[in-house]
Image: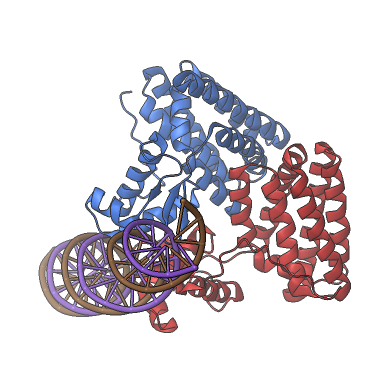
Chain colours: A blue, B red, C brown, D purple
Amino acid sequence: MQDPTFNKSSDNDTAGLRRRVFAIIEEAVLNGKYAPGESLTESRLAAELGVSRTPIREALTQLEHEGLVQLVPNKGAVVTGISQKDIQDIYAIRMMIEGLAARWAAQNIQEEELQELQEAIDLEEFYTSKGDIGRLMSLDSNFHQLLYRASKSRPLQHMLHTFHNSIQHARSQSIAAPGRAQQALKEHKAILQAIRERDGDRAERITAEHIRKASVNLLKTMKARQG
Amino acid sequence: MQDPTFNKSSDNDTAGLRRRVFAIIEEAVLNGKYAPGESLTESRLAAELGVSRTPIREALTQLEHEGLVQLVPNKGAVVTGISQKDIQDIYAIRMMIEGLAARWAAQNIQEEELQELQEAIDLEEFYTSKGDIGRLMSLDSNFHQLLYRASKSRPLQHMLHTFHNSIQHARSQSIAAPGRAQQALKEHKAILQAIRERDGDRAERITAEHIRKASVNLLKTMKARQG
DNA sequence: AGTTGAATACTTGTATACAATCATACACAT
DNA sequence: ATGTGTATGATTGTATACAAGTATTCAACT
């Protein structure tokens, strides 16, 4: 076994300027290069990134929907940033909602989806032993996305997808913490087991616990990193 | 007392084509004029509404974020529609999240916000006795928005705001049901009382119950109407 | 000095033109 | 008959031009 291919990519990868622009601005906001309160005008960003205003506009509206900036007419996009409390709140919300997702998944999952989850976990195990953080990030995403899909609830799927994106940056820090990947893998296995046994209560409970632990870990990491 | 003015309008009212276009397409989707599965191309909509593609594009991306269409490249915006199960799911999610909002509001609300909630309820009482459904809709929205704000959680506020929009249409049906407005008013009063007493547990519980009742009522209404 | 007013520069909102990509239909070969 | 390759048409993505509205600045006046 050398490098299991990872072909199930739910995200659209055909770059496009908008995606690149979005990623760049998002990164800059999250890194603090654009400070909270600062207002970004379209023309300035367009000049800075060497593209026209159109893709900038689209990226900004998307950023607004993710809550990173606030679009105020004739003023520009005001950077809001994400505080530590925001992340804490997001995890508190995720605890409830992903718990619900796990419960519904236990009720509605299909045999094929159980297999997909199992495969995701197998890959996770492989890369955890290899210590490949990059892959683990995307596999963790994958596991949770599969969970959402198995819940058979479109609104829930939609909402969690949005959320997931908005804290992607934070999650990547969390999983890089020493020992966290191993722990997450163990928790993922337990969640799958509960779902496989169609035990909705337990699935909900341990999924919430999984999120809570990730949250604790993340906040610890963030505090260690920036004071 | 004749017509208490309602000046606190959080929404931006400066029309703009995008907003109008958005409203028109949203209405058409919710009314079933554009059937689920149908794909709307930008040029077609632009011609139909007599505007250029630009505001259409922006409206469509917004509609995608609200989950009403899915933007697929080179195919157009595919209408997804909202099923009865979707609404059921949304209310299940709202039960949890708004419960959380009420709990946090009980912890963090300020004196001034308590007064605003009280005023909202007073107005609600007035228009309930008058039977002015239109006002009640916007007052119900207002009450819940105030609640979100009082929770002092930006992510929660943001998420619930999005949700609130996406089911605005459904809610307007719910509140129009006979007797529902009176019941909702009573429940709002109870919620405010719990928050005023800083009883987070109770506030969470009865808020969840409030959403559940609204959900039951709405589904009954929908079934009666189109089932 | 503070206030008011107008002029200017800037910013967003919209329209339109162009490029690149993709789906589809049709002809042709097997 | 079926599969394949190509050509055409359609659709989105991006750039740019223009219009309308707003914030800001500076000067004049009280």
**Vertical placement of A18 versus B29: above or below?**
above
Decide: is B146 above or below B13.
above
Residue A93's x, y, as percent? 63, 39
Q: Is residue B168 left or right of residue A148?
A: right
User: Can residue B211 be seen by looking at this rendering?
Assistant: no
Task: Answer yes or no: is residue A15 visible.
Answer: yes
Q: Is residue B165 left or right of residue B43?
A: right
Q: Position of residue A7 (x, y in %)?
A: 35, 41
Q: Quadrant of residue C5?
A: bottom left
Left-right relation of A5 to D5: right
> Which quadrant is home to the N terminus of chain A?
top left
Q: Residue at x 60, y 28 (%)?
A: A210
Give me the residue at 48% from left, 18% from top. A224
Look at the picture and state if B143 lies above or below A187: below
The answer to whether B130 is drawn above or below residue A203 in the figure is below
The residue drawn where x is 47% and y is 31% is A171
Q: Position of residue D7 (x, y in %)?
A: 13, 74
The number of numbered badges drawn on the structure is 0
Q: Nearer the viewer, residue D2 or B110?
A: B110
Farthest residue to the top: give it: A179
Q: Nearer the viewer, residue B9 or B112?
A: B112
**B150 lies left or right of A73:** right
The quarter of the displayed image where residue B123 is located? bottom right
Q: Position of residue B50 (x, y in %)?
A: 41, 83
Residue nearest the observer in this picture, D25 or A88? D25
Q: Nearer the viewer, residue B204 or A128?
A: B204
